Image (cartoon, coloured by chain):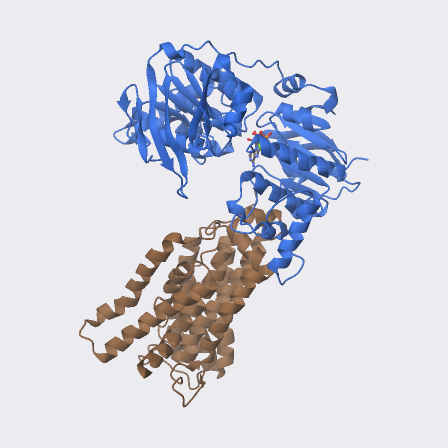
Amino acid sequence: MNLVEMRGITKRFGALAANDNVDFVVRPGEIHALLGENGAGKSTLMKILYGLYQPDEGSIVIDGSDEPLRSPADAIARGIGFVSQHFSLVPTFTVAENVLLGYEGRFRLDPAEMNARVAQLAAANGFSIDPAAIVGKLSVGQQQRVEILKALYRDCRVLILDEPTAVLTPRDTQALFEILRKLREQDLAVIIITHKLDEAIENTQRVTVLRLGKVVGSQDTSSTTSAELARLMVGRQTVPVQREAATGSTQRVVLDVNGLSVADKRGVQALRSVTFQVHAGEVVGIAGVAGNGQSELVSILTGMLQPQSGGVSVDGKPVILGDPRACTQHKIGRIPEDRLRGVIGDLSVADNLMMEQLDQFTRVGHLQPAAIAEHAQRLIEDFQIKASPGDPVRTLSGGNIQKVILARTLSQDPAVVIAAQPTRGVDIGATEYVHQKLTEQKARGAAILLVSEDLDEILLLSDRILVIYNGQLVGEFASDAVDLDRLSMLMTGAEKTG
Amino acid sequence: MEFIFTLLGATLRISTPILYGALGEMVVERAGILNLGIEGTMLLSAFGGFVAAQLSGSIYLGLATAIAIGILLSLLMGFLSITLGLNQHVCGLGITLLASGLALFLFRIIYGGESIPPALEESFPQLRLFSGTILEPVFSQYVFTYAAFLFVPLLAWLLYRTSFGLRLRSVGENPEAADTAGISVFRTRYVALIIGGALMGIGGAFLSLAQLGAFTHGIINGRGWVAIAIVIFGNWKPWRVLAGALLFGGLQALQLRLQAEGVQLPYEILLMLPYVLTIVAIAITGRNASYPAALLKPYRREG
Ligand SMILES: Nc1ncnc2c1ncn2[C@@H]1O[C@H](COP(=O)(O)OP(=O)(O)OP(=O)(O)O)[C@@H](O)[C@H]1O
Ligand SMILES: [Mg+2]
């Protein structure tokens, strides 16, 4: 007996078919991975199942009934729960208020009773969470648990999670899958969208792969490998980039960071006297668990934050800190952690591409449309961005937005590249592409600082790895002498010395 | 001592219409809508209530009319800003202009060019508690004033202790979350506007049917705008909004008193005082203001 049967689903946005005659079947008691590149149509399919989008064609049968899903309320009533990429929580409400919202059960509310109800639900499913906590103050992992609780409270039988692990630390990811396994034992079905193939192989029973809106494979997880899945997703064999031999230490120092210290908003010391150098043609990776000072370091180096003490120089010239314009002057290229903050969504691809070089595209204060369009066309071709110059950037998929940022940054031949989480939420095809581009920059002689929570990425690209813990650099490894055990210990603070 | 009690009494009276306006505005803003139509809504309510009371001879019918006008103008605000999703600043200012123009126009038609403002034969009486005691000047108030103070805990209860209040606040903070929880964002916002419009209507009626028992064009005189400022001062919380209304009312009462005492200051400066101090108070408290996150944002489901 199938719990969900989606048959012949087609959904068009203008000329584009985001889902094209998709069949998708989920059984009770399985964790089902939905895979595909950026823009393959995964989120669209799930939004249709949750009643957020109406399909143009096709039928959906849930538990034997094919009544149409006109709104999320319909879907919830039919037992569908959805945890989207962007949480839909009210940050100023408590955990309990968020869980019960819309399903309070009575007009008069009694906070103590609400907290007790949510605590009981959490305990029954093996969560530990404080029902009275304000959601906006919780970590991402905890907020995700609130979303899951919300769905469970509404008696969901099918739980959809859209890229739940993209923003989680490894430990939170493990905890999440433990919870999902428990749900599966209670005969719920879980649908999980992810870009991490190993995660899908290890934790799911079935996989369905979408490419360009069509299903290109649906099978038992045990009968496939991550290499096969990767090939299905991309439609060709994938090859991870090879790191070029380190040329670093023999070269001149380009980025010189000296004794940076800063406190965060609450006055807690976020960086403690951080000092390091990056040479021309060298990739230095900063490894660490999220929240150990990486964001602050990147913010300082990109001019968005003023440190309490310390200095930065590029090619021997001191950089004025706390002023983003200094970055352009010193040719510091930025690939920001949150790509939506690196672009202006309502402006066109062309405008976003020239934004940092406005002077070159204006004459006595007048924009030069022809030059801007030509510039955009060239970069769109060079960087294989799937968009036209006039499209507003917000309509692009995550991977393509990242390409716009890469194109803008790397086409200016930066002396230094600060790459923060450059492949977060990006599919393997685009990940490979980003890696290849960074490697090209290195060959050109740029000094590259790679800050990533993805240890595999750090190991793959870096010539030298620095470990950050609690705002301090606690260790350094050369790429050919990495002791993984010691690295993990340093990252988690289990070993203190550097 | 007596001076203080008289001042307190005046404070309560002056605060009343502002408190109604501010409470109404607070409810609406909590649902994510800034209703800049408040100034015009209070004016047309004051006018309509007055005309209805004069024509029918019933002050209660007058009050009902004022409330109805408040609700109607708020529904218009809802149609423009919720259903059509138009810019809330423009819609609100438009409604204020429309309502002020209507009041002026209808006044001309009904009362012609009379230079003495028309007055009611019978207006709402004062309800004196503790008469004969030292507290008498404090508690010689219109029913409206006592009711306004009851609305504060009532609205606090509604916002924080009922499922309706939770939903209303969720719609003003994160309409997507409310929508995915099966709450109708449109309907909730309309209900908030209706409650707010009714309160603004009562605020207008208080002036024309009780305190003055007459109508002039300057009857609202910026009280709607002050109410909006007080909502910010009150950080969208009923009890703090009450504090804000009392602060403004108190400064106004003091200013009037100082004028009456013949203080050696140009009266313009005294007139300015409550406004200037309100701005200062907001500059201090407003920095930590926690605006409803979805304020000013029309809601559309994507796709
Ligand atoms: N509301 C919309 N309007 C127009 N186009 C849309 C809309 N939503 C999605 N699309 C387009 O539909 C295609 C599929 O998008 P979808 O979000 O489903 O991809 P995805 O597989 O979830 O990708 P990702 O891994 O980046 O999240 C993309 O090309 C996207 O640009
Ligand atoms: Mg998606």
Along the line of sight, the residue nearer the viewer: B91 or A144: A144
Q: Which of the pair B73/B247 is nearer the observer?
A: B247
Residue A272's x, y, as percent? 38, 32
Where is the C terminus of chain A found, in terms of image quarters? top left
For chain B, what colour was chosen?
brown
- Ligand 1 falls in which quarter? top right
Q: Specify whether A50 is left or right of A395.
A: right
* Residue A311, percent from left and from top: 30, 28
Most extreme residue toward the left is B264
Q: Is residue B98 above or below residue A244?
A: below
Q: Which chain is drawn using blue?
A: A
Determine the image quadrant of residue A450.
Answer: top left
In which quadrant will I find the N terminus of chain A?
A: top right
**Is A475 located above or below residue B1 in the figure?**
above
Q: Is residue B216 left or right of residue A219?
A: left
Q: Is residue A464 left or right of residue A413?
A: right
Q: Left or right of A85: which side holds B66? A: left
The quadrant holding residue A163 is: top right
**What residue is rendered at 26% in x and 66% in y?**
B272
Residue farthest along the right direction in this orientation: A1
User: Can you see residue A323?
Assistant: no
Q: Residue at x 41, y 40 (%)?
A: A268
